[in-house]
Image (cartoon, rainbow, N blue to C red):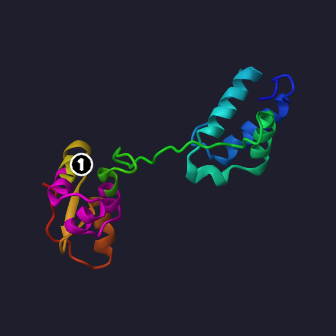
Amino acid sequence: MRDPKEINGVVLRKCLKILNNCKVLGVYIDFFGMNKEEMIKSFAYEIEHLPEYKQNKIPQAVIEFYNWMFEDEGDVKVQFRHIPYISKFGSREGTQMYIIDLMLIEGGHTWEEIARACNATKERVRSHMNSLRRRYGVKIWRERNKYYLRDMRDEVKEEGKMAKGFLDE
C-alpha cells in the first residue's frame, strides 16, 4: 500500500462518496470526522469484502483508485472474498435448508422435487417446513401437492384459481 501521505484525501473522499451514492455496499460509510488513515482502512475493507454478485457494480474510477493505492504490492488487483448468500430465513448458501428456502420462496414445487434438489429425504423437508412455521411464523400452503408461501396466495387468487389444502394451522 502506498504511504498515506501520497494518497490525496480529496480523491479518497470522492471515491467514498461515489461508493455511498451508487449503493453497492449496502451500508453507508460515514467518513465525517475520520482521519485519512481510518478512511483508507474503511475504504479498503469495504472494497475487499464486497460479495461476488456486486463486484461488477463498482464504478471504474473507484477500482482504478484502489488499484493505484495498492499497486506497489505487485500485480495484485482487487481480490474479492466470497461471502455466502443468506436466505431471508437465515439459511446459509450451500446447505439443504438454503435450497429448501429458495424453492419455497419460488413456490410451485412438490415435496419430492424439493427433496431431490437438496439430496434429502421428504421427512427432512417436512421438518424444515415445520421449523419455518414455528420459528418465523411462515404460512405455507399446498395446492395440487405443490407448496407455496402464504404471500403468494393473493397472486394465485387474482388469477382465478381456488386455493385448497391450506397448511396454516
Q: Which image quarter: residue 106? A: bottom left
* Residue type at tag 1: Leu
Q: Which residue is mark 1?
A: 132
Q: Does residue 98 sit above or below 49 in this rendering? A: below
Rendered residue at 21%/49% (across/down): 133
Q: Residue furthest front?
A: 74
Q: Is residue 106 within the magenta segment?
A: yes
146 lies left or right of 3: left
Q: Main secondary structure of the magenta part?
A: helix
Rendered residue at 24%/48% (across/down): 132
How many C-alpha atoms fall within 10 Å of the one at disc 1: few (<14), some, or many (≥20)? some
- Residue 43: x, y in percent? 69, 33
- Residue 162: x, y in percent? 21, 76
Magenta residues span 100-127
- Residue 118: x, y in percent? 29, 59
Rendered residue at 34%/70% (across/down): 155
